[in-house]
């Protein structure tokens, strides 16, 4: 039990924020102060990401344009199409949860976990760094635009130029400032990775607590049924399995080598809670953000657990394949 808690403490902490918000939701003036603190934490997070990302790595990874294009098409085209197909089924869940599923499908990829799993599985790590970072940067523009397109198509609205401006100011501006200061801070931050991890995970916990506090005060648990939760879990699993199969097998048909296929699989199948939670706060301000973020939260946990297993299996198969070659050279 102790080892499980140590390994999965972050997953436990995220659901702990949901429990805490359900028991002790924050509201009124304290919630406004907490919201400002959360926005500052998110801005600091993206500043640190910008300051850590080496320009040499960006330049090296940018040359592999076919891989990056495949990941971007999967993230911002294939995923939304799958989401629309799923939501074509009538009366599947509440409108807020349906909005959350579609919002999940237009989000960018993760950065840390995509790179970490690619590294464990012995994939193309430089390409993963560049591809995941490009997905996040472009996602600051593409996600709100896709929200405007898809939700207008479904009659939901949910997008404005003000929302785009808010995202750019809160996420992109700190990232660019970090890139400007990268030559001065990059090495120091590489030696102190725990700082970025602390801000990364802490800011997400703050967003989750704030969003669910607002939702609980608005009567979330009275509106949500067990059937709704089961539907979200099943849909998240279906989406993840479909995209994992698409990225791995279709990338093989396009002639990518093993290392590149691993990179495409992990970068193309992820959805970022770090980017998605603050974007939801801006894009859906005044709406039921807690319900909208719930499918993303559940998907985030499912993707981490699934990809952890896949990464270990990829690594084991690589070692097994390398063993006969090593024996021949002895």
Image: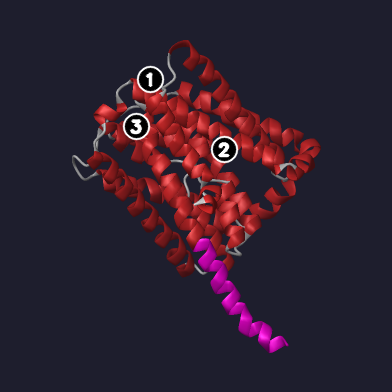
The answer to which of marks 3 and 2 sits earlier in the sequence is 2
Q: Is residue 55 above or below residue 100?
A: below
- Using the image as rendered, state which of residue 150 and residue 322 is in the foreground: 322
Secondary structure at numbered mark 1 = loop
- Using the image as rendered, state which of residue 171 and residue 302 is in the foreground: 302
Mark in the foreground, 1 or 3: 3
User: At which x and y percent is residue 240?
Assistant: 39, 53
| Chief secondary structure of the magenta portion | helix
The answer to which of marks 1 and 2 sits earlier in the sequence is 2
Coloured how? secondary structure
Q: Report the span colored magenta.
A: 310-330
Disc 1 and disc 2 in contact, CB within 8 angstroms: no
Q: Residues within 10 Å of mark 3 (few under 14, many from 20)?
A: many
Q: Is residue 217 above or below residue 305?
A: above
Mark in the foreground, 1 or 2: 2
Cα gap from disc 1 to disc 2, whole angstroms: 25 Å
Q: Identify the mark at residue 201; answer none if there is no mark.
A: 2
Disc 1 and disc 3 in contact, CB within 8 angstroms: no
Task: Give the residue at mark 1.
Answer: 286
Residue at screen point 56% across, 53% down: 68
Task: Give the residue at mark 3.
Answer: 291
Tell me if residue 329 is in the magenta stretch: yes
Cα gap from disc 3 to disc 2, whole angstroms: 21 Å
- Residue lying furthest top in this view? 29
Q: Residues within 10 Å of mark 1 (few under 14, many from 20)?
A: few
Tell me if residue 157 is in the magenta stretch: no
- Using the image as rendered, state which of residue 58 and residue 20 is in the foreground: 20
């Amino acid at each position: 039990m102790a080892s499980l808690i140590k390994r999965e403490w972050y997953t436990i902490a995220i659901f702990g924020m949901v429990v805490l918000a359900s028991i002790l939701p924050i509201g009124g003036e304290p919630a406004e102060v907490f919201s400002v603190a959360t926005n500052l934490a998110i801005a600091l997070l993206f500043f640190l990401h910008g300051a850590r990302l080496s320009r040499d790595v960006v330049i090296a990874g940018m040359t592999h344009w076919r891989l990056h294009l495949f990941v971007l098409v999967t993230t911002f085209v294939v995923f939304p199409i799958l989401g629309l197909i799923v939501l074509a089924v009538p009366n599947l869940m509440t409108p807020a949860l349906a909005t959350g599923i579609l919002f999940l499908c237009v989000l960018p990829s993760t950065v840390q976990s995509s790179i970490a799993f690619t590294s464990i599985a012995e994939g193309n790590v430089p390409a993963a760094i560049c591809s995941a970072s490009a997905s996040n940067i472009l996602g600051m523009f593409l996600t709100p635009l896709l929200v405007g397109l898809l939700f207008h198509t479904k009659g939901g609205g949910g997008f404005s130029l003000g929302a785009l401006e808010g995202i750019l100011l809160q996420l992109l501006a700190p990232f660019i400032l970090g890139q400007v200061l990268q030559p001065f801070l990059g090495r120091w931050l590489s030696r102190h990775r725990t700082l970025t991890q602390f801000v990364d995970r802490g800011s997400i916990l703050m967003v989750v607590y704030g969003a669910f506090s607002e939702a609980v005060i608005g009567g979330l648990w009275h509106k949500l049924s067990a059937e709704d939760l089961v539907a979200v879990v099943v849909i998240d699993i279906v989406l993840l399995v479909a995209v994992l199969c698409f990225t791995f097998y279709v990338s093989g048909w396009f002639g990518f080598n093993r290392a590149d296929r691993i990179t495409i699989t992990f970068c193309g199948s992820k959805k970022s809670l770090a980017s998605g939670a603050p974007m939801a706060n801006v894009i859906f301000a005044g709406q039921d953000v807690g319900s909208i973020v719930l499918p993303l939260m559940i998907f985030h946990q499912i993707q981490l657990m699934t990809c952890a297993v896949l990464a270990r299996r990829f690594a084991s198969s690589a070692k097994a394949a390398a063993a006969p070659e090593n024996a021949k050279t002895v």
